[in-house]
């Protein structure tokens, strides 16, 4: 695909994406023509997921996840659509547009559809929640855009150097031991830690952290972070040609852990949300691994 055709395709994708985003925004504002349909669709999707054991989290956190997911494509699509010399400017404009959109949504949200609700319906609370969620989406979008540039390079990194693979093997052994010690203990590793964590959350809520950042939010986020190293290590072992093995490894490892807990550890609770969070972490880790491998390769090339 030529550069011109790639930009045209990206522009079309951006237009479709923005159209879908307008429909989604209509669900949380007072645009009557689309609000009823979009809210019903969102309710149906979340309800179906929860009946399957997924997204058993606070409504505010689920909404924040949806906002982050909606923002993730912005920077990758802009990077594809804009000419190379204008990517920095286009990216800055896109970030500004996301911030402005967050402010407008916070100001126009109808009371019965408050985005990332839980802050007593206050406009300031909604804005803080939206900005938190949008910031996460932009950060992940920047990572996706950077990794896509590396993978799509005419001269990709290819197979990792021997010293990189040796370091990755050592890290994999240490990581496997740590993961096993967390996953296969008879009782949850956070047992008894709840009251302490809640006190810390109360302090954070007092200084403006959204109230949907609760125990389940921390647990879900911790499960994402736990599997980020797995994605990184797998990519450093197999190289860019099979970078997606990092995501597959996360799904397989997490499913195996949850199945093992279900069958052999009555004191532990198998959870589909854990598989979702772990796999998400592995995907993020794989993208980080792509960027790390590229940086290592460039430094080695500059020394040669």
Image (cartoon, rainbow, N blue to C red):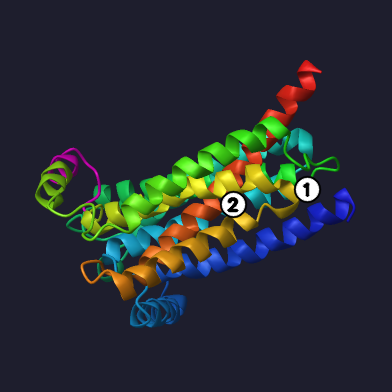
Residue 221 appears in the figure: no
Q: Earlier in the sequence, mark 1 or mark 2?
A: 2
Secondary structure state at the residue bearing disc 2: helix
Query: Residue 198 versus residue 240: which sits nearer the camera?
Result: 240
Question: Which numbered tag is attached to residue 91?
Answer: none
Residue lying at the far top of the rendered structure: 303
Which residue is identified by label 2? 74
Which residue is identified by label 1? 152
* Residue 99, position as x, y percentages in the image: 46, 45
* Residue 154, position as x, y percentages in the image: 86, 43
Residue 28 relative to residue 6: left or right: left
Q: Give the alpha-carbon distance from disc 1 to disc 2, as whole Å.
A: 18 Å
Q: State the extent of the magenta-drawn residues as a range.
A: 202-211
The answer to whether residue 204 is magenta is yes
Q: Residue at x 15, y 49 (%)?
A: 193
Residue 10 relative to residue 106: left or right: right
Residue lying at the far right of the rendered structure: 2
64 lies above or below 131 = below
Q: Residue at x 21, y 59 (%)?
A: 187
Quarter of the picture containing the N terminus is bottom right
Q: Residues within 10 Å of mark 2 (few under 14, many from 20)?
A: many
Query: Residue 125 versus residue 185: which sits nearer the camera?
Result: 185
Q: Residue at x 45, y 49 (%)?
A: 176
Query: Residue 213 versus residue 239: which sits nearer the camera?
Result: 239
138 lies above or below 256 = above
Secondary structure state at the residue bearing disc 1: loop
Q: Tags 1 and 2 in contact by the CB under 8 Å rule?
A: no
243 lies above or below 21 = above
């Amino acid at each position: 695909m030529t550069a011109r055709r790639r930009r045209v395709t990206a522009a079309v994708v951006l237009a479709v994406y923005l159209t879908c985003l307008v429909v989604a925004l209509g669900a949380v504002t007072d645009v009557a023509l689309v609000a009823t349909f979009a809210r019903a669709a969102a309710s149906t999707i979340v309800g179906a997921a929860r009946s399957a054991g997924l997204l058993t989290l606070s409504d505010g956190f689920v909404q924040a996840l949806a906002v982050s997911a909606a923002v993730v494509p912005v920077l990758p699509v802009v990077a594809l659509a804009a000419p190379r010399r204008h990517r920095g400017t286009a990216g800055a404009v896109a970030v500004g547009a996301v911030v402005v959109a967050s402010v407008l949504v916070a100001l126009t949200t109808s009371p019965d559809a408050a985005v990332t609700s839980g802050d007593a319906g206050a406009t300031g609370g909604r804005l803080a929640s939206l900005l938190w969620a949008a910031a996460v989406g932009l950060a992940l979008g920047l990572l996706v855009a950077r990794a896509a540039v590396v993978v799509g390079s005419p001269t990709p990194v290819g197979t990792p150097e021997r010293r990189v693979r040796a370091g990755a093997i050592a890290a994999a052994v240490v990581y496997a031991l740590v993961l096993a010690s967390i996953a296969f203990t008879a009782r949850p590793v956070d047992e008894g830690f709840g009251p302490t964590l809640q006190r810390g959350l109360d302090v954070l809520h007092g200084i403006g952290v959204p109230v949907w950042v609760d125990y389940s939010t921390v647990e879900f986020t911790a499960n994402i972070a736990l599997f980020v190293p797995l994605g990184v290590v797998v990519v450093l072992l197999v190289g860019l040609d099979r970078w997606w093995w990092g995501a597959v490894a996360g799904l397989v490892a997490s499913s195996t852990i949850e199945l093992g807990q279900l069958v052999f550890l009555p004191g532990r609770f198998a959870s589909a949300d854990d598989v979702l969070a772990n796999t998400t972490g592995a995907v993020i880790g794989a993208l980080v691994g792509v960027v790390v491998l590229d940086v290592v390769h460039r430094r080695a090339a500059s020394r040669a």
